[in-house]
Image (cartoon, helix red, strand yellow):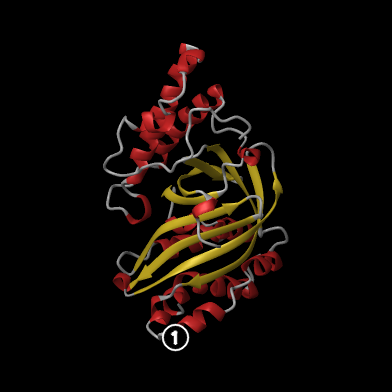
């Protein structure tokens, strides 16, 4: 039940994220796909197929039917990114409906499975890197697995609580961009979501850290939420060296531990990644498989900053 002590926990967590934040601051991969980030920009066009497939390989050994399907997959990836990118991470374009995104995603996943591209994300090694959010079905903050764990802890009340914070209009609250840095070898996961209030006067980055517990089938990974902390607060930055000291030394909120006290096991989430190649990733919450999150790879781990 949702008793008074839980109210205090909910208040503490949400105030940390939405209120305190600004004030305190796959087994087979096609040989032709190069390890490069998706060039999401005004120059995005059909030439991306040449960038993605390359021209230095001999395609004569690939059956024409298979090549047609691979071309179709590239078309679908391009369509998905075009659909999502205009409204991603604070963009001014109209956000597509979940139904429109799911329509493209489901066809993309079907074709990808036929040609064996982007599959078995738990073992392909392609998850590692820094990813930028292109589409979230709800508020951008919901891309953070902390909110998935919060929903595990408060299944009967989470939606109502989220609706209150989501209803805060711009420019009082603006969210994005959102990034995730994943290192499957080190078993680390860092989610960063920028939150701004009062027309950008006060901003910070809500940072959630998680630990990999293991694989769940060919496309799932179980993560344990560890901590949540507002970082890079512009309010603290105005304090100069003192603000930097406060930002660097303030302890993160033990969100995972608190959620475990509410409901044992709540801090663990399973991220299902049904498509992942060197450029695009499609992930879901195990418990809400119709809610898709679309990501583009920003850079590989070799060029990311330390997390």
Q: Which quarter of the figure is the N terminus placed in?
A: bottom right
Looking at the picture, does residue 59 appear above or below residue 249? above
Looking at the picture, does residue 206 appear above or below residue 221? below
Image side of residue 139 versus residue 271, left or right: left
Image side of residue 193 versus residue 228, left or right: left
Q: Residue 65 versus residue 176: which sits nearer the camera?
A: 65
| Residue linked to disc 1 | 241
Q: Residue 282 versus residue 124: which sits nearer the camera?
A: 124
- Location of residue 69 in the rendering, given as x and y in whole percent from the top left corner: 46, 20
- Location of residue 80 in the rendering, given as x and y in whole percent from the top left corner: 39, 36
Looking at the picture, does residue 155 appear above or below residue 19? above
In the picture, residue 163 is in which quadrant?
bottom left
In the picture, residue 243 is in which quadrant?
bottom left
- Location of residue 114 in the rendering, given as x and y in whole percent from the top left corner: 55, 22
* Number of callouts: 1
Image side of residue 90 versus residue 69, left or right: left
Q: Residue 59 versus residue 220: which sits nearer the camera?
A: 59
Q: Residue at x 42, y 79 (%)?
A: 23
Residue 126 visible in image: yes
Q: Residue 138 versus residue 284: which sits nearer the camera?
A: 284
SS assignment at label 1: helix
């Amino acid at each position: 039940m949702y008793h008074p002590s839980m109210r205090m926990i909910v208040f503490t967590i949400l105030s940390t994220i939405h209120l305190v934040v600004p004030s305190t601051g796959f087994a087979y991969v096609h040989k032709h796909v190069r390890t490069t980030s998706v060039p999401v920009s005004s120059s995005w066009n059909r030439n991306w197929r040449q960038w993605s497939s390359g021209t230095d390989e001999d395609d004569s050994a690939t059956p024409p039917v298979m090549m047609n399907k691979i071309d179709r997959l590239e078309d679908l990836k391009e369509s998905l990114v075009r659909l999502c990118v205009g409204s991603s991470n604070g963009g001014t374009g109209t956000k597509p409906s979940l139904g429109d995104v799911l329509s493209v995603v489901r066809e993309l996943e079907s074709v990808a499975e036929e040609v064996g591209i982007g599959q078995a994300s738990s073992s392909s090694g392609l998850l590692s890197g820094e990813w930028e959010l292109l589409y979230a079905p709800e508020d951008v903050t919901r891309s953070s697995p902390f909110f998935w764990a919060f929903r595990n802890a408060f299944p009967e009340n989470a939606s109502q609580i989220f609706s209150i914070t989501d209803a805060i209009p711009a420019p009082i609250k603006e969210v994005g961009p959102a990034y995730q840095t994943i290192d499957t070898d080190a078993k680390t996961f860092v989610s960063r979501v920028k939150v701004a209030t009062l027309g950008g006067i006060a901003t910070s980055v809500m940072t959630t850290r998680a630990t990999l517990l293991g694989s769940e089938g060919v496309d799932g990974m179980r993560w344990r939420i560890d901590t949540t902390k507002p970082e890079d607060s512009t309010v603290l930055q105005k304090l100069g060296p003192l603000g930097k000291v406060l930002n660097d030394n303030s302890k993160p909120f033990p969100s995972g531990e608190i959620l475990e006290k509410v409901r044992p096991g709540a801090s663990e989430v399973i991220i299902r990644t049904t498509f992942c190649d060197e450029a695009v990733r499609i992930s879901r919450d195990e418990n809400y498989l119709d809610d898709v999150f679309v990501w583009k790879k920003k850079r590989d781990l070799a060029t990311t900053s330390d997390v």
